[in-house]
Amino acid sequence: MKSLDEIINESKDPREVKRALSVKMALSGMPSAQISAILNLSPQYLSKWRIRFEAQGAASLLLAYKGSESYLSTEQLSEISAWIASHESLSIEALRDYLEIQYGVVYQSKQSYYDLLQLGGLSYHKSEKKNPKGDAAQVLERRETIKKNWRSTQKK
């Protein structure tokens, strides 16, 4: 079981650290108002986590959410990553169809498909070869002013 110091020193989640710090400060005799001001917390927050710590111990300060189980195994993810890497470009729809046919997986969020594309070394951002807002005359004019300024700084 973890102690307050272990949670403070080893936790990667700031919520767990704040909980442990607030409890440790309260146990050391520091007034609640001062703890609230230092950690920017409400008195109710302090009271809640101190009561929980006293009743259930330091482990009760840790986050309980562990996430859901993945639809795909690590082996399947590596196969999908290799399949994505074998393509020069790939649309979200093509990836979605592939996953549905091969693995029977359909994600609700497009973010899952974006993450898979990134895993395979592709980006979901559409690129354009030419800036659609670019005005050729303005670009040439700007280039000329840059060249003039560049030449004038070199002579000095």
Image (cartoon, rainbow, N blue to C red):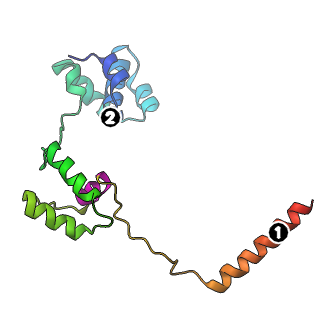
Q: Which label sits on residue 47?
A: none
Instruction: Say if 72 sits above or below 9 in the image.
Output: below
Left of 15 or right of it: where is 40?
A: right
Count the marks: how many? 2
In the picture, residue 127 is in which quadrant?
Answer: bottom left
In the picture, which quadrant includes the C terminus? bottom right
Q: Looking at the figure, which quarter contains the N terminus?
A: top left
Q: Is residue 67 above or below residue 6?
A: below
Q: Is residue 32 left or right of residue 44?
A: right
Residue lying furthest bottom: 137
Q: CA distance from mark 2 to mark 1?
A: 53 Å
- Is 126 rendered above or below residue 32? below
**The residue stretch that appears in magenta:** 112-119
Q: Secondary structure at mark 2?
A: helix
Mark identifier at residue 149: 1
Q: Residue furthest top?
A: 28
Q: Residue at x 21, y 70 (%)?
A: 93
In the displayed structure image, the side of residue 13 where residue 64 appears, left or right: left
Near-viewer residue (138 or 84):
84
Kind of residue at badge 1: Asn
How would you rate the neighbour count of disc 1 (Cα within 10 Å): few for under 14, some for 14-19, many for 20 or more?
Answer: few
Please say whether residue 115 is one of the residues in the magenta stretch: yes
Chain-order first, disc 2 or disc 1:
2
Q: Residue at x 38, y 14 (%)?
A: 29
Magenta region includes residue 105: no
Measured from the top left, where is residue 134 in percent x and y?
A: 57, 80
**Nearest to the observer: residue 126 or residue 107:** 126
The residue beneath circle 2 is: 15
The amino acid type of the residue labelled 2 equals Arg
| Residue 47 in the image, given as x and y percentages of width and height | 28, 28
